[in-house]
Image: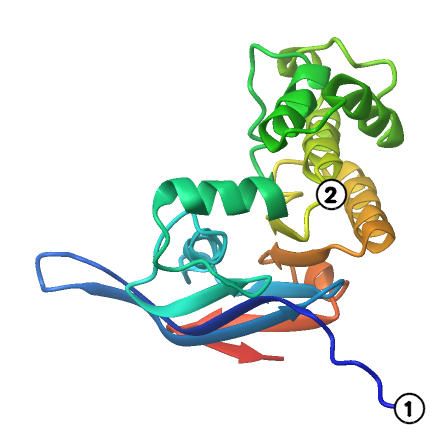
Amino acid sequence: MLTPEPRSVLIATDLAKTFPDERGGLNIFNHINIRADAGESVAIIGPSGAGKSTLLSILAGLDEPSEGTIELLGQPLTGLDEASRAELRANHISFVFQSFQLLPELSALDNVQLALEIQGHPNPAQQAGYWLDRVGLSHRHQHTPARLSGGEQQRVAIARAFATEPSLLFADEPTGNLDEKTGTEIIEQLFELNRQLNTTLILITHDASLAQRCQRRLYLHNGTLQEQ
């Protein structure tokens, strides 16, 4: 019996990014190709300034490549207008950032609930509470980010990311602002939830030991991306 081919969640082909400057253009990378299948974890590693976060922004449709194409779940992402890209992101993509990216005036519950409301979830408050409980913050629903520790803020961000049940999760240096012990706990939780939901994970990091947790590792350096 033939084993079915894995479903490709993300396919990027011949990506290039050039920023204009006084000398005619600063080339960040060229001929980048990435494929990530359902449930797969992929680390993109490389030195600071290599363009990892720029690549993430392009893969997520937050920025456009100078050349190349991106498909998300079989749908073309490149060439869409911003409203269409935003709709695809809302329905299929979540993020966990180094800086947490929580709205400071909202409670933990409201930060998670807002993402669900944008997606059109029928019971956003109930679902937001469920996910906060799931990441160990049952006693912090009404706390604003200023009243939470760094680790707790990142747990809210993780709850928000998984509450919408995304097909694809981008994590950009998710432990960068945390101490080692807290960072380890956050990563354990991130990978466990990712496994349970079978989410495709693309992890941006400079931490080689963290990258080893992923099934595949891609090294971005001098404008090229090579599989390790």
Could you tell me which quadrant the C terminus lies in? bottom right
Number of the label disc, if any, that sits on residue 165: 2
Q: Position of residue 170 (x, y in %)?
A: 60, 50
Element assignment for label 2: loop
Residue 61 shows up from this direction: yes
Where residue 140 sits in the image (x, y, percent)?
80, 14
Q: Identify the mark at residue 27; answer none if there is no mark.
A: none
Neighbour tally class for label 1: few under 14, some 14-19, many 20 plus, Cα within 10 Å:
few
| Image coords of residue 195 (percent x, y) | 84, 55
- Frontmost of labels 1 and 2 is 1
Q: Nearer the viewer, residue 27 or 39?
A: 39
Which of the 4 image quadrants contains residue 22? bottom left
Q: Mark 2 or mark 1, which is nearer the start of the sequence? A: 1
Kind of residue sitting beneath label 1:
Met
Residue 94 visible to the viewer: no
The correct choice, above or below, for 90 with respect to 147 in the image is below
Q: Vertically, is 173 above or below 141?
A: below
Please state if 192 lies on the left or on the right of 12 as rendered.
Answer: right
